[in-house]
Amino acid sequence: MDRQTGMTCNVPWKNLPWAYGYPGATARWRVVPEDFLVEEVLGFEPAGQGQHVLVQVRKRGTNTPWVAREVARLAGVASSAVGYSGLKDRHAGPTQWLSVDLAGRSEPDGSSLGAEGVEVLGCSPHGSPPGPGIGRFRATR
């Protein structure tokens, strides 16, 4: 079944005409999320102090806005207090940074910010929300 269209293709590929004969090899790309890993790089080291906490997460089968809302809920802040520097592919194995504006609240325990499909890799305080991240992309297969 095609993930984008939701349609099943039952074409007998070997029976179709090929300009140079049937290909000698075939391949399958992005069969599982780990086939395409996306790593977001901040481009700086977190300051270690400040009213924002930078949370690094690894997602699987989840979209960025949903993860941001879950982190906000678990941190006890409004959804608008969580920022991110771009949407990452739901069907990849992305590592992404989120910024949580604590505005005087105590820093939450990083392990309490995880949700189904979300692994918290680390948390670090920082003085201000980061600007756009630098995306590093890597195909694993």
Image (tube, rainbow, N blue to C red):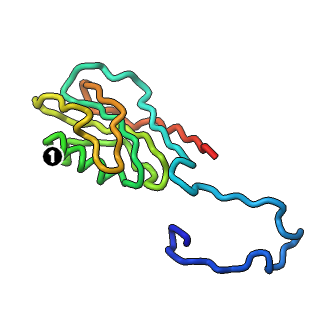
Quadrant position of the N terminus in the picture: bottom right
Residue beneath the point at 50% across and 43% down: 38
Up/down of 118 relative to 66, above or below:
above
User: Local crowd at mark 1 within 10 Å, few (<14), some, or many (≥20)?
Assistant: some
Using the image as rendered, state which of residue 129 and residue 33 is in the foreground: 33
**Residue holding disc 1:** 78
Place of residue 117 in the rendered image (x, y in percent of width and height, measured from the top left): 36, 50
Residue beneath the point at 23% across and 20% down: 49
Residue beneath the point at 37% across and 42% down: 85
Return the residue found at the far right. Answer: 20
Using the image as rendered, state which of residue 16 and residue 97 is in the foreground: 16
Using the image as rendered, state which of residue 36 and residue 86 is in the foreground: 36
Place of residue 24 in the rendered image (x, y in percent of width and height, measured from the top left): 84, 61
Residue 113's image quarter? top left
How many labels sit on residues? 1
Up/down of 64 relative to 98, above or below:
below
Q: Would you say 139 lies left or right of 4 here?
A: right
**Residue type beneath disc 1:** Ala
Place of residue 78 in the rendered image (x, y in percent of width and height, measured from the top left): 15, 46
Residue 74's image quarter? top left
Place of residue 94 in the rendered image (x, y in percent of width and height, measured from the top left): 45, 44
Residue 72's image quarter? top left
Numbered disc 1: secondary structure: loop
Return the residue found at the far left. Answer: 104
Q: Would you say 94 lies left or right of 21 here?
A: left
Return the residue found at the far top. Answer: 48
Up/down of 72 relative to 20, above or below:
above
